[in-house]
Image: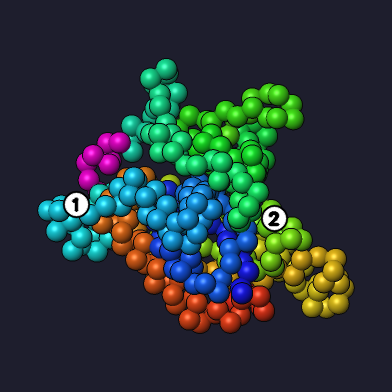
Amino acid sequence: MKRINLALQGGGAHGAFTWGVLDVLLQDEEIEIAGITGTSAGAMNGAALKAGLLNGGRDGARQNLDWFWQQLGAIELPGLDLWLGALPPSWISQGMEASWPFIAADALQRFTSPYALGSLYAHPLRGLVERLRYDLVCADQGPALFVCATNVRSGKARVFQGAEISTDALLASACLPTLFQAVEITDPTTGTQEAYWDGGYTGNPALWPLYSGDLPEDVVIININPLRREALPVTPQQISNRINEISFNASLLSELRAVAFVQRLIAQGVLKREEKRDVKVHRIADDELMNSLSVVTKSWPVPSVLLHLKEAGQAAAKAFLAEHKTALNSHSTVDLSEMYG
């Protein structure tokens, strides 16, 4: 049995790629998911997986993930998909970005605040996220689940786990401040209300919760935000998107630098393996696909694009297992110095 931890990045509707990766991993009886750390869409994927796993095993987890993404729009629409499904996702994404409705909505977003709606404001995902079974999401059984959000006032990461995970915690983890009002959650220690924004600013995802001694050393990172873009961003939307990608990857790269530093000290004999975790890092991604998509399909789900992302995630996971499955619980398959250098 290969015991692994999953680190699930956020990236809005592009999290459908992670849906596909998880679908394949869950079908492999030789892989046990021991821990999950997630941010934004990654946190929601993790919650849906855990609730389904405890309710119906591996098939239950796959079905719950299917249900969750179908609620977000990953369904086949007869007629519409007949021609949209035939188009490459990159064409759909770039076409939408250049459309007047998106340009107008983007311009409006830059000059207005989510607080402008006052009492009329309602989070569009609350109704769906509330339908997750939190008796299972928060259970001691199954994979340990960690959800990262960013404390607005302190700027520090806040990791929710166990009974702390709630609808508000998941919404906080996915709270982009230009789109949503900050999610307020009462701190059980101080009794004060704290406001939270998207966890991607401080941990996308946070890796340190996985360093517990009862969890395996292998961390499989499922990347949504491309680390590198060759094309220079020139439009306001492209520039804003790349700024977000860089800032949302920064915390992950910082943690990976620390992992690489510890690995070097262990290899040199300066540290003993008993003193520090010798984290083994793996990565599943499709940077070519993510480079071809624009920011618009992160926030405006398109059924054919969601389904294509799932298929791409399935293909990436199958390729990873074919090439690197034997390395799990043995050694890293990522050159960290190249990744963060």
Is residue 80 shown above or below 125? below
Q: What x and y, as percent, mark residue 246?
A: 52, 54
Please give the name of the residue rendered at 40% of the width and 34% of the height, measured from the top-left corner. 127
Q: Is residue 305 left or right of residue 17?
A: left
Q: Bounds of the magenta span?
A: 98-105
Quarter of the picture holding the C terminus: bottom right
Q: What x and y, as percent, mark residue 244?
A: 49, 49
**227 or 39: nearer the viewer:** 39
Q: Inspect this view and state whether residue 184 appears.
A: yes
Front disc: 1 or 2: 1
Q: What x and y, as percent, mark residue 33?
A: 58, 63
Would you identify the image quadrant in which residue 118 lies?
Answer: top left
Q: Residue at label 2?
A: 208
Quarter of the picture holding the N terminus: bottom right
Determine the residue located farthest toward the top in the rendered image.
Answer: 119
The amino acid type of the residue labelled 2 equals Trp
Q: Residue at label 1?
A: 77
